[in-house]
Image: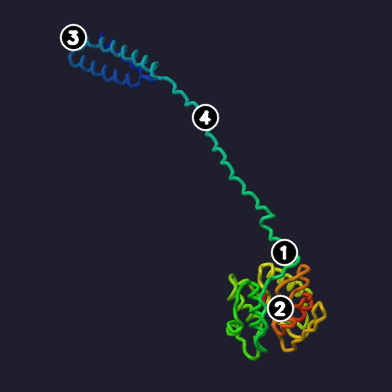
Amino acid sequence: MEETVKHHLKRQLRRLATERPYQVAAASAAVLVLATGTGALVAGPGDAPASAQTPAAVAELRGNTAASRGEARSVAVPPSSAAPSSAAPSSAAPSSSPAAKAAPDPDLTKKPKPPKSKLLKYDYQAQINFYYCGPAAVRNALSATGIERSQDHLAGPLGTDQFGTDSAEDTTRVLNAMVKGDPYRTRMIPGRAATPAQMDRLQADVVDAITDGRGVVVNIAGSATDTNGGWHSFPGGHYIAVTGYDDEGRLVRIADSANPATGSYWMTTIALANWAATRGYSA
């Protein structure tokens, strides 16, 4: 009888062991059966309690197996796949472009056209000695700018002596020392006659300076004729001031300190440029 029960239990255990989800339960049952069988063999045929526990153990094993199957069915729920996020990342709104700067009005930034004619008021003074033509010309040009200086005051900075004043570089330096902003520049005409480009340059420089309210100082040498036919000759060199222009700078007004009787006259810019050849001017 015991052999039959033992054989039946082993067959049940083999069947349960083949079912993969319940291998653990089968292993537990095997341990229980072996323990029961061992107890029956040790107790012998007269040991009733050991054999009486065997059917209960089998029933408990079957109940546990059924419960394990039910739990497997209820627990084994397929994991739901995570739903893809439907909210796409919002693209950053484009920043509003800064307001474009308004282009400057060309009528406001454009340099105004100079007048066709302009004369500066000045305080004429003849040179006080034969070699003060440099200080006298600078003094007359400064008076057109509203600056009053004596010839003696200017002679020292100009380096003037009985041989006169050296060059237009000196008159430019002293004029810039007196006029705010250092507006004067030296232009040299080194050849024996002015070129057309140098004539045009002198005309433009005179217009710019007079329009700016500044007189021009020119270092001349030789002879020239004014618009009235007057003859002016200084073979050893001389300094004069320009205090106005006409016809868009083609004509210039001269302030000449050499002779009060002919202290002011008009001359073409071409004639003045040739008169300044080998020398230069401050404008």
| Label drawn at residue 87 | 4
Q: CA distance from mark 1 to mark 2?
A: 22 Å
Q: Which mark is residue 255?
A: 2
Instruction: Quadrant for residue 97, please give it.
Output: top right
Amino acid on which disc 4 is placed: Ala
Label 4–label 2 contact, CB within 8 A: no
Position of 134 with respect to 58 (left or right) is right
Tell whether label 4 touches label 1 (CB within 8 Å): no
69 or 278, which is in the foreground? 278
The tag earlier along the polypeptide, 4 or 3, is: 3
According to the picture, the residue beneath numbered tag 3 turns out to be 48
- Residue lying at 21% horizontally and 14% vertically, measured from the top left: 40
Distance of mark 1 from mark 3, alpha carbons? 140 Å
Vertical arrangement, residue 144 with respect to residue 63, above or below: below
* Mark positioned earlier in the residue sequence (2 or 3): 3
Residue sitting at x 44%, y 23%: 79
Residue 239 locus on image (x, y percent): 69, 82
Front: mark 1 or 4: 1
Residue 88 lies left or right of residue 10; in this view the side is right
Mark nearest the camera among 2 and 3 is 2
Q: Earlier in the sequence, mark 4 or mark 2?
A: 4
Q: Earlier in the sequence, mark 1 or mark 2?
A: 1
Say which quadrant the N terminus sits in.
Answer: top left
CA–CA distance between discs 4 and 3?
Answer: 73 Å
- Say which of 45 and 204 sits in front: 204
Q: Residue at horizontal 22%, vertical 18%?
A: 38
Q: Which mark is residue 114?
A: 1
What's under tag 3, amino acid-wise? Ala
